[in-house]
Image (cartoon, rainbow, N blue to C red):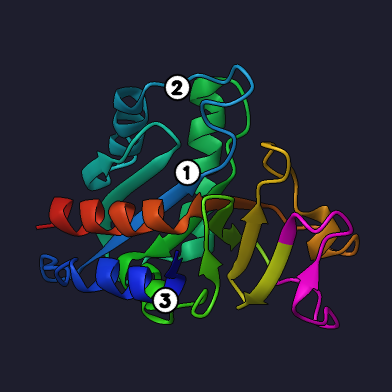
């Protein structure tokens, strides 16, 4: 068994700082509902679609919809998100929610060690959920699901940090039981160890 904080710190320290061309920002687009439920999209096709919008240095990591790219510094996040979502839906024929973060923002999430102190066992998975809007202000944390298989340990305005517990060999599904019924946003999750690799790939691709 190991502590989550130690693993997270090691992964973050192993990724070098991003070297970006002057006047640019490196973004990571976390796409929701890609290559699940029959919505199959090749990463090559996704990279092409991002390039069609004039974005440069486009790359991707594994098949779960993680695309990184460079854009002009000062791009408006909401406007860029809307452009991407519109273009992807027109090209693919189904909506693809996009959660945009800069590499520095993702690095800050990892550096904060949000799962510090959580005991990692073979039945535990650490998930970072990127949110389209903050969770309800009155939500008292931590929150554990009635079945005990989900625990929302903490949250920021843009991320929620959720511990999965595999019960009887079955992972939990959905986050409604810990996010609260009042929340009307959407999110997409990545395992902590996968997020570390996505950040490293984005930094490498940005050089």
For label 2, the crowd category at 10 Å Cα-Cα, with few meaning under 14, some 14 to 19 and many 20 or more, is: some
Q: Quadrant of residue 167?
A: top right
Residue 84's tag is 1
Estimate the x, y position of residue 106 in percent, counting from the top left: 39, 68
Residue matched to label 2: 41
Q: Can residue 132 be seen in this view?
A: yes
Answer left or right for 141 relative to 78: right
Residue at figure coordinates x 63%, y 62% from the top left: 163
**Marks 2,1: beta carbons within 8 A:** no
Highlighted range, magenta: 134-150
Q: Can residue 107 be seen in this view?
A: no
Estimate the x, y position of residue 38 in percent, counting from the top left: 60, 16
Numbered disc in front, either 1 or 3: 3
Question: Which element carries disc 1, helix, strand or loop?
Answer: helix
- Residue 20 covered by magenta stretch: no
Q: Is the magenta stretch mostly helix, strand or loop?
A: loop
Question: Which element carries disc 3, helix, strand or loop?
Answer: helix
User: Is 18 drawn above or below residue 27 in the view shown?
Assistant: below
Residue at figure coordinates x 44%, y 73% from the top left: 3
Counting residues from the N terminus, which is met first, the one under dot 2 or under dot 1? 2
Residue sitting nearer the eye, 30 or 176: 176
Counting residues from the N terminus, which is met first, the one under dot 1 or under dot 3? 3
**Marks 2,3: beta carbons within 8 A:** no
Whole-angstrom CA distance, mark 2 to mark 3, is 34 Å
Residue matched to label 3: 5
Counting residues from the N terminus, which is met first, the one under dot 2 or under dot 3? 3
Numbered disc in front, either 2 or 3: 3
For label 1, the crowd category at 10 Å Cα-Cα, with few meaning under 14, some 14 to 19 and many 20 or more, is: many
Q: In which quarter of the image is residue 48?
A: top left
């Amino acid at each position: 068994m190991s502590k989550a904080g130690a693993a997270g710190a090691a992964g973050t320290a192993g990724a070098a700082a991003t070297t970006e061309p002057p006047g640019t920002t490196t973004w990571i687009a976390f796409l929701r509902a890609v290559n699940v439920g029959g919505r199959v999209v090749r990463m090559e096709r996704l990279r092409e679609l991002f390039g069609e919008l004039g974005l440069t240095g486009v790359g991707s990591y594994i098949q779960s919809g993680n695309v990184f790219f460079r854009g002009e510094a000062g791009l408006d996040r909401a406007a860029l998100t809307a452009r991407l979502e519109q273009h992807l839906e027109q090209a693919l024929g189904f909506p693809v929610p996009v959660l945009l973060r800069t590499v520095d923002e993702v690095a800050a999430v990892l550096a904060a060690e949000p799962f510090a102190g959580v005991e990692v066992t073979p039945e535990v998975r650490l998930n970072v959920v990127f949110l389209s809007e903050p969770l309800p202000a009155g939500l008292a944390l931590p929150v554990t699901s009635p079945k005990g298989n989900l625990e929302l340990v903490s949250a920021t305005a843009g991320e929620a940090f959720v511990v999965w517990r595999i019960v009887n060999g079955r992972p939990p599904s959905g986050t409604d039981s810990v996010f609260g019924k009042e929340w009307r946003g959407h999110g997409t999750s990545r395992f902590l160890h996968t997020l570390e690799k996505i950040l490293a790939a984005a930094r490498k691709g940005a050089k």
